[in-house]
Amino acid sequence: MAWIAKNSAGATIVRRSEPYLTPALKAKLEADVLPRYPTKRAALLPVLHAVQHEHHWLPAQALEEIAAFLDLAPAQVLDTASFYEEFWLNPKGKYLIMVCQSLSCELMGQKGLLGKISRKLGIAPGQTTPDGKYTLMTAECLGSCGSAPCALVNEVLHENIRADNFERVLDTLE
């Protein structure tokens, strides 16, 4: 994934009254994360992960708070967060479905599976359903080539899946 290039100089940041980087989260990061790194800047990735884990995405306000916490420019934090595809700069659905698109999965029917899921949910990869329930993504490799095709639903790996048995997985979700 490439960096996001957009004219954001005049963008309005939606703010909420309570911080994303709460005093409790700051204390935890100061105790558990910052001591493991030679500089605050070096701790940027684990701090981004911690805030995203807490809030399920990284709003612009959170990026500014992280920048202040680590004594970095907000642009440096945005550059990093927008470069790595595991960071979410937009809200994602309650259920994140990642379909593997490695060569093994492709040879075992990944395209048909992805098409079936996409039609059932009414969204394309990279989109979230209007009700905010599902986000559909593709992944380069989920590391389960011997049991292809596979998909990850939140943090649960589903192996040897086909369109029919994965539909049952979707039906079990709330």
Image: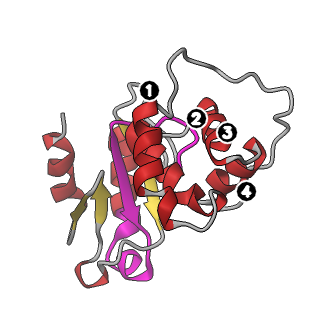
Q: Which residue is mark 2?
A: 62
Q: Is residue 85 visible?
A: no
Of the pair 30 and 167, the residue shown nearer to us: 30
Out of 91 and 30, give the one closest to the viewer. Answer: 30
Is residue 162 left or right of 122 when viewed as pictured? left
Q: Which residue is mark 3?
A: 68
- Magenta residue span: 86-112
In front: 119, or 148?
A: 148
Q: In the rendered structure, which amino acid carries the disc numbered 3? A: Ala
Q: Amino acid at mark 2?
A: Ala
Q: Nearer the viewer, mark 2 or mark 1?
A: 2
Q: How is the image coloured?
A: secondary structure
Instruction: Answer few, some or many: residues within 10 Å of disc 4's Cα (few below 14, many 20 plus, some between 14 and 19).
Output: few
- Residue at (52, 25) in percent of width and height: 19
Q: Earlier in the sequence, mark 2 or mark 4?
A: 4
Q: Which mark is residue 130?
A: 1
- Residue 132 found in image quarter: top left
